Amino acid sequence: MLKKFSLTMLCLVLAGCGTSRISTSGGTRDINTDISEVTLTTDSYQNKNLFRVGMLLPLTGNASKVGKGMKNSALLALDDVQNPNLVLQFYDTQSSQSGARIAIENAVSQQSDLIIGPLMSTEVQASSGRAVADNIPMIAFSTSQDVLQPGVYTLGLLVDEQVKRIMNYAAAEGRRRFALLVPDNNLGLSVARAAVRTAQKNGTTVVKIAFYPPNTSNFAEILKKLTNYSARHAEMQRKKAALKARADAGDAKAKRELARIKTTDSSDDVDFDAVLIPESGTKLKSVISMFGYYDIYAPKVKFLGTSIWENTPMNKESLALNSWYPRLSRYQSSYFADKYYNFYNEKPRSLYSFAYDAVALASALSKHQGGDLNAAITSPEGFMGINGAFRFFEDGSNQHSLDIMEIKRQGDAVVDAAPKKFDVFDYGISYHQDIYDFAAEQAPLIIGKDAALARSQIYAR
């Protein structure tokens, strides 16, 4: 079975194999990053059982540094899997649509059994049609679900699964009413779609969705509306006035309460108990600190993020402490990082590990050469790789096993570990599909965007 083989193969890979050097069709024993075809054997032309994998990567152009890093990672994986029937054929997409079209033509003409890549969504759009027409499965690295279809998969970490994971965890921890603060672009809409879908399935509610201009650095007005600050401020002023009247009349308890809330500008009575913010960097720090300005604090409201939070150190931001976000499992990332550094004398980017896993997956799929590769790729049991368990759905989307991280002063900590395997009974065509219609009174309040337009975009089928 594919599951048994793939798990065994990839686990053996991660355990660390020998130190044999990679050979090419030209016969050299060194890793050569300029070659177009790589295999472990020197008799590739006599071997009739070769499984040819066309790797479409941006080896020149704007994304060339990433492309070369992914190629390096692919070579490390080839060295580890020790599969003499596996051949990697590299094609340069030149970081462009036109380059991707040329690359896929070459890959098809040179009898690729499987396509790995391209990296960017525009490259996938430009090349996937030819792969589908020739019934060659494509496993890309794009994080855009719009370019996926049956036969065109991605290993990229999709927004949907991040939102589902973090909202389901928050719900399990008692959070029931969610607010979203998202950019007014495709990312924001993707987060919104995933959030209302998840809420429908786990019995929670998305009460508000606030859209802000993607290029803004001023969140004051949008947060004022999201937190209903004006009404809360007015409520606090009425409360203080009533307490003052009672205190002036000699009520000692009222006097003590008035002293306690002297510096509080507004009530803490908001209609959400969690807010999801898919931002990073200085914007993320700015927006979380701004919540404090409007008297919104944890634990009354839990701040939630997506995987990009991992790239922003938040341990010194007091308002962000104990917040949660999902990230890829670090199942065997230290092995990969160490090996990459030893070979190339630099630390790998997290994206590079996807290329390693893709080649290890290709090695497992090579056992199904001549059979239905798409059926093998979409095995409900999935596979285990550097970043933990992952599996593909028939519509091209995927699922990764994700850790839930909590921001701590001393360093982010895993509070809910990624599962080591998937429930095969929780598998369908895709767990990313189906946005359900909500009655008007149940639909989230839309802020910062035309409500009718936003709802049509969020609930469109």
Image (cartoon, rainbow, N blue to C red):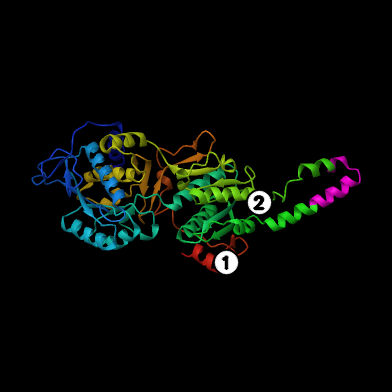
244 inside magenta stretch: yes
Image coordinates for residue 283, horizontal then vertical, percent: 52, 51
Q: Are marks 1 and 2 in contact (CB under 8 Å)?
A: no
Q: Is residue 220 above or below residue 31?
A: below
Badge 1: residue crowd in 10 Å (few <14, some 14–19, many ≥20): some
Q: Residue at x 71, y 57 (%)?
A: 231
Q: Which residue is mark 1?
A: 451
Q: Closer to us: mark 1 or mark 2?
A: 2
Q: Position of residue 374 (x, y in %)?
A: 28, 52
Q: Answer with left or right where residue 390 lies relative to residue 313.
A: left
Please indicate whether residue 341 sits to the left or right of residue 427 in the image.
left
Q: Quadrant of residue 354?
A: top left
Overall secondary structure of the magenta stretch? helix
Query: In front: 157, or 323?
Result: 323
Magenta segment: does it hold 109?
no
- Amino acid type of the residue tagged 2 in the rendering: Tyr
Q: Please state the extent of the stretch shown in magenta in the rendering.
A: 239-254
- As drawn, the residue found furthest toward the right would be 249
Q: Residues within 10 Å of mark 2 (few under 14, many from 20)?
A: many
Q: Which residue is mark 2?
A: 294
* Distance from Cα at disc 1 to Cα at disc 2: 24 Å
